[in-house]
Image (tube, grey):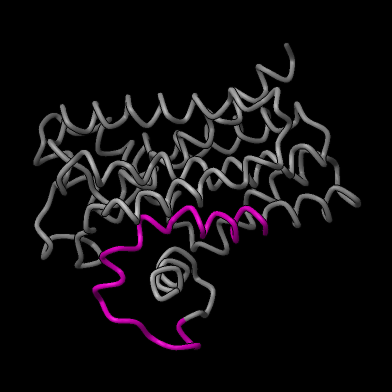
């Protein structure tokens, strides 16, 4: 339970810290429990979408649901997406890419990435009726976090612990933690139609390709890479589900 509590505290801005504190060693092992925070953030998006779709135009309701997660997480993943694209787009070498990612200022690539993410995610979710879109958002959140979490198992951290933004480096998953992560990411899939389960392959492929890119460009990963991989993988889940639904 302390691992999940640490994950909820680390990956959201909700005041879980008021309920107690946990040792730093638990924060070094929060990534395997990242999918479980998807149950919370995905559930918040579902509830927001369902309620707002009763009074707002559907496109606005979807945007409201996506922004609800931004508020809950403090734009943690969106910040990673922007930094990732700024670094990969504007950096010519490893050190320059890492320096740009660490810079708190946002550049052209980051702005375009964020605009593209919200427009594409909203447009793809418009494919589905509200009830199905709620289920897809819930499942995609947890499953995509599972896919993105595998970065720490196959790549080294690209910086030293002292250079990390949050001053810690994640531990690789043990066998038990990997099983827990898979369970957390896979269980929400029961809420989507069987015919759309093929969409789960898209985030797996997307995460794999991004891992190869990180290995080639910076020889490892950063926290920004984790956040970016999650959002891009989630977008690919929506894409896969939309294609299968239309077919």
Tell me if residue 225 comes above or below residue 202 in the rendering.
Answer: below
Percent x, y of residue 5: 45, 74
Q: Is residue 141 left or right of residue 196?
A: left
Nearer to us in this view, 103 or 42? 42
Residue 169 lies in quadrant = bottom left
Q: Identify the residue at horizontal 78%, vertical 37% (top origin).
A: 132
Picture quarter with the C terminus: top right
Percent x, y of residue 84: 31, 40
Tell me if residue 73 comes above or below residue 81 in the rendering.
Answer: below
Residue farthest right in this picture: 54
Picture quarter with the N terminus: bottom left
Percent x, y of residue 77: 43, 51
Tell me if residue 144 comes above or below residue 49 in the rendering.
Answer: above
How many marks on residues? 0
> Which SS does the magenta portion mostly show?
helix
Magenta highlight on residue 27: yes
Magenta highlight on residue 200: no
Residue farthest top in this picture: 247
Nearer to us in this view, 192 or 50? 192
Nearer to us in this view, 42 or 78? 42
Q: Which residues are magenta?
A: 17-44
Q: Is residue 111 left or right of residue 166?
A: right
Percent x, y of residue 216: 15, 27
Residue 90 lies in quadrant = top left
Tell me if residue 172 comes above or below residue 74 in the rendering.
Answer: above
Q: Identify the residue at horizontal 24%, vertical 73% (top origin).
A: 25
Q: Identify the residue at horizontal 39%, vertical 47% (top origin).
A: 227
Q: Identify the residue at horizontal 12%, vertical 52% (top origin).
A: 159
């Amino acid at each position: 339970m302390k691992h999940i509590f640490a994950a909820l505290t680390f990956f959201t801005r909700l005041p879980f810290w008021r309920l107690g504190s946990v040792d730093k060693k638990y924060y070094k092992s929060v990534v395997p429990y990242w999918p479980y925070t998807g149950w919370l953030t995905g559930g918040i998006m579902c509830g927001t979408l369902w309620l707002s779709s009763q009074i707002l135009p559907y496109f606005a309701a979807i945007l409201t649901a996506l922004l609800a997660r931004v508020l809950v997480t403090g734009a943690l993943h969106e910040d990673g997406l922007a930094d990732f694209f700024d670094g990969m787009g504007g950096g010519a070498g490893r050190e320059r890419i890492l320096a740009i990612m660490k810079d708190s200022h946002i550049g052209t690539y980051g702005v375009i990435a964020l605009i593209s993410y919200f427009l594409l995610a909203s447009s793809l979710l418009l494919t589905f009726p509200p009830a199905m879109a709620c289920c897809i958002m819930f499942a995609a959140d947890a499953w995509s976090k599972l896919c993105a979490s595998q970065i720490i198992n196959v790549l080294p951290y690209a910086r030293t612990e002292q250079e990390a933004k949050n001053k810690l480096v994640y531990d690789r998953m043990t066998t038990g933690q990997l099983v827990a992560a898979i369970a957390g990411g896979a269980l929400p899939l029961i809420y989507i139609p069987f015919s759309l389960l093929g969409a789960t392959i898209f985030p797996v492929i997307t995460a794999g390709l991004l891992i190869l890119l990180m290995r080639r460009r910076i020889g490892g990963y950063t926290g920004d890479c984790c956040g970016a991989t999650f959002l891009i993988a989630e977008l690919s889940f929506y894409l896969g589900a939309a294609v299968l639904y239309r077919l």
